[in-house]
Amino acid sequence: MIRSFSLVSAGALVVAAGNAFAGITTVDPGVYSNVSEVGQARIRLDQGNSQTWKAAFWKDLTMLSNSGVQGPTPTVWSNATEYAWTIKFDAGTGNGSIQVAANQNVVTSANFGLAAGKSLAGFYFFVNSTYAGGSDLNGAHAKTEVYNMTAKLDGGTAIAIPSITADFLQSFVQGPNYYFDSSVTDVEFSGKIKFTWNAGANLNNERNKFTLKFLEGNRIPTPGAAALLAFGALAAARRRR
């Protein structure tokens, strides 16, 4: 069955074409319980020497993998330049990958499998673009833009996801939780990212970043499945008598 959903984020309305495997909705469909974060993918701008990664996977407070170039200037990124990116995660194997077609073609991968008994339930994302102040010249700031985003579920049709932007006026912007309305194993996200900054801006640390967080949860049996489970348990009890 082909499904369609309306996705609403920051005032934008997008009609997303679903596929035969699953759909995405911002309204909790009641398919999963105990929903929590399982891991995250990050793409980051940095010109400092304190941290070297420009793309990385994290689980809780542990960095699992990273890729990038260290330097006093942002050698991976060019100012106000659009780069294509792809983030993949296979819940069956626990393998994830990030690829950004930037100046050094940033690539990294990691394994962060789901907890026992959990299923892939959805995702959400946010962007940072923090005004540093102090050392910045003339109120210099940076902007993080992520747009032309799509999601493919189990290799199905691309589903449009609203763009998200943060700048010095709104330095942290988080999108809504997106839920899968049925079982999903493999997800592939793609889009464009652009970092823009003024000369002299302090771009160190985690001031400018795009983060995609994956959600896991316990699958709630459908009424029909629950009835079958109950019937099976009753039949087993009768056989034991």
Image (cartoon, rainbow, N blue to C red):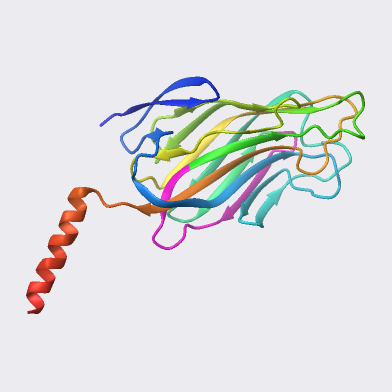
- Image quadrant holding the N terminus, namely top left
**Quadrant of the image occupied by residue 21:** top left
What residue is rendered at 91% in x and 34% in y? Answer: 134
- Which residue lies most toward the bottom here? 241
Q: Is residue 234 above or below residue 226?
A: below
Q: Is residue 189 rendered magenta in the image?
A: no
Specify whether residue 111 is painted magenta. yes
The spot of residue 139 in percent (x, y) is: 87, 25
Of 85 and 238, nearer the camera is 238
As displayed, is residue 212 above or below residue 216?
above
Above or below residue 151? Residue 122 is: below
Which residue sits at x=19%, y=60%? 229
Q: Say left or right for 222 vs 154.
A: left
Left or right for 155, reference 199: left
**Is 2 or 67 nearer to us in this picture?**
2
Instruction: Note whether residue 149 is visible.
Output: yes
Decide: is 210 above or below 78.
below
Which of the image's four quarters has the C terminus? bottom left
Q: Is residue 47 left or right of residue 7?
A: right
In depth, the one of 35 and 119 nearer the eye is 35
Q: Is residue 90 in view?
A: no
How many marks can you see?
0
Tell me which segment is drawn in magenta: 102-122
Q: Position of residue 20 (x, y in %)?
A: 30, 35
Residue ID at (79%, 40%): 46
Q: Hey, which quadrant is residue 72 in on the image? A: top right
User: Which quadrant of the structure image shows residue 3?
Assistant: top left
Decide if residue 38 is on the left or right side of residue 128: left
What x and y, as percent, mark residue 219?
Answer: 34, 52
**Residue 102 on image: x %, y %:** 71, 33
